[in-house]
Amino acid sequence: MKRLILVLALVAAAGVRAEPVEAELGFDEYLALVGKSNLSLAAQRYNVPIAQAQVTVAKLFPDPQLSGGISSFDIARSGAPTALDVNISAVVERGGKRGNRIRVADRGVVGAKDDLSDFIRTLRGQAADAFVDALSARLVLSRKQKTFDSLTTLVQKNEDSRRAGNIGDLPVIQAKVEADKFKGDLLLAAGDVRKADIALAQFIGTAVPIAPKGDLKLAPRTFDEAKLVADAKARRPDVLSARAALAAAEAKIDLAHSNLAVDPTITLGYMHSFHSYGEYNVIAPTPAVDTVTASVSIPLPIARRRFKGELEGALATRGQAEQQLKVAELEVEVEIRQALVTYRTTIDRLNLYTSGILTNAEKVLQDTTYNFTRGNGTQLEVLDAQRTVDEVYLDYYQALADHAHALIAVEQAAGIWDIKL
């Protein structure tokens, strides 16, 4: 936790530092920081309160309407009374419209939370893959540095032998060419490490390089394929999101049925007619009068009964959601089965290196070097053996990285996570 706080402080200070400071993080610490600081995840989190706000909107009742004015005014000045009225009207929703609106919005909240969980699942896998790449880049750099050091030592020994008069210029030049050539590979490897560290930093919302701390030598795992598929279909968040979308589509059908019901409008009114004395014997004097009115208006559902576009659209949406759920479940099964095939292949490939290739390559180099120092071999044989060892180790490191990537892919597909690097 202290390391996490330290890195957070480094991230916060990244914008003001003249030189970036590289922080070393373990796998779990790094993933925790990704969950806390990733900018895309921070943006994705807003979808949940946005969906929750729609629930609040769905709970609203139609606002009543207040109207008023002069209902009668004698512009002919014939003595007719002036009348003022005030009316309040309210729509009475029928058919369970409000309840169905809330159900649709609630399903939207569930879907938003599932989408957020799936985003986190995907992001975690991407960050884990980047962590593996960074560790792999360091292994490659270490191997190339070791090879370059060996070549540099060979050059130094040749120069000593030339000064002693034991060899000519050709072996020295030959060794220097090989060392200089390999130095280019070493520089490229160093650049790859730096780029991998910066890629890690991007996942935590900064450009300050992150130095990974971990080990790619993971023990082979065995998985129950049928159980992985069944569990993933039941709990993977993208499948849950598809189920929430289907539930929302069914709720929209209920809402569309509700919207076919007509909503009456109830109006209550109050009118006050002022006292009139009458004029020119045309209109008789009248006293002041207060009256109240009540009315109900019901729209005639001619169009909505004939044209049911909302209901037809909701039914089509449900059909689409059903197919999308089937697609999501099928994709889960395919992903898991493919990931397991790849993972088992990486185990078999890794076993080739751990069963003796590395040891044999090292022994060939040692024996060739020993023979060369005793005058029983050539420098070309030593250089060739050195290249072979280098290639074998680089292939081995790639096999380690592929094995880790494949394990990540299996657990991502299965919706589980217990990887430790």
Image (cartoon, rainbow, N blue to C red):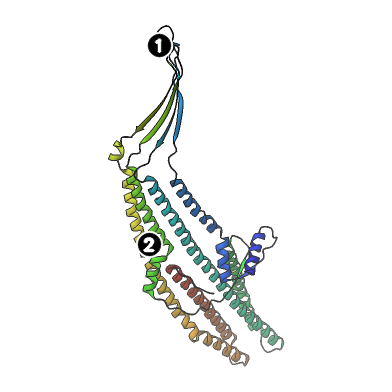
Q: Is residue 331 above or below residue 96?
A: below
Q: Quadrant of residue 193?
A: bottom right
Residue at disc 2, secondary structure: helix
Rendered location of residue 110, percent (x, y): 43, 57
Q: Amino acid at mark 1?
A: Ala
Quadrant in the picture for the C terminus: bottom right
Instruction: Give the residue at mark 2.
Output: 328
Q: Is residue 15 above or below residue 137?
A: above
Relative to the observer, which residue lies in front, 370 or 291?
A: 291
Residue 203 appears in the figure = no
Rendered location of residue 390, percent (x, y): 55, 80
Relative to the observer, which residue lies in front, 239 or 86?
A: 86
Query: Label 1 neighbourhood size at 10 Å, few (<14), some (14-19), many (20+)?
Result: few
Q: Residue at x 44, y 71 (%)?
A: 410
Residue 284 badge: 1
Separation (CA) of disc 1 from disc 2: 82 Å
Rendered location of residue 70, percent (x, y): 46, 22
